[in-house]
Amino acid sequence: MEKITFLLVDDDPTSNLITTYNIRKKLPQARIHSFKEAPRALEYIDHHWRDLAREVVYLLTDWNMPGMSGSEFLGQLGKRHPKILSHFNIYVLSACDQDVEKKQAMANGVRGNLMKPLDQATLEALLD
């Protein structure tokens, strides 16, 4: 069985907790790494990108975060590891739904937009 890893990038600890709970319920074997700050997620990926390249990776990032937005985060990720954008299953997990940002997100390798909180039905559809 392939290793499945989830990278959660969201400054909201409650959102991370709910998302982690729902992933654990559906996929208890999945590895989950949660980051409240986008620069910390970049550091993690910098140090572990070779391992991540051999796994199925779902990257769920908030769009509106202090310090570094989701757009800036994905832009930096693409500059540092261009091939990762096509390997990772990247989704924006956000409380807001703005069409202008969706176009920008798609340009950064995002496969779709999900509304917070991530529920079981959405997770199951994501994994299909």
Image (cartoon, grey):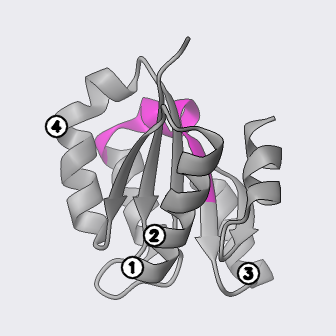
- Name the secondary structure under disc 2: helix
As shown in the figure, which amino acid type bears the numbered disc 2?
Asn
Mark 1 Cα shell of 10 Å, populated few (<14), some (14-19), many (≥20) = few
Magenta stretch: give its range.
Answer: 80-91
Q: Is residue 89 magenta?
A: yes
> In what quadrant of the picture does the N terminus appear?
top right
Observer-side mark, 4 or 3, equals 4
Answer left or right for 68 relative to 82. Answer: left
Regarding residue 108, the answer to whether it shows in the image is yes
Mark with earlier residue (3, 1): 1
Mark with earlier residue (2, 3): 2
- The residue indicated by pointer 4 is 47
Give the vertical position of 123 relative to 27 (above or below): below
Q: Which mark is residue 13?
A: 1
Residue 115 in the image: x percent, y percent? 72, 74
Observer-side mark, 2 or 3, equals 2
As shown in the figure, which amino acid type bears the numbered disc 3?
Val
Q: Residue at x 65, y 43 (%)?
A: 26
Residue 108 in the image: x percent, y percent? 57, 55
Q: Residue at x 21, y 41 (%)?
A: 46
Disc 4/disc 1 C-alpha distance (Å): 23 Å
Observer-side mark, 4 or 2, equals 2
Disc 4/disc 3 C-alpha distance (Å): 33 Å
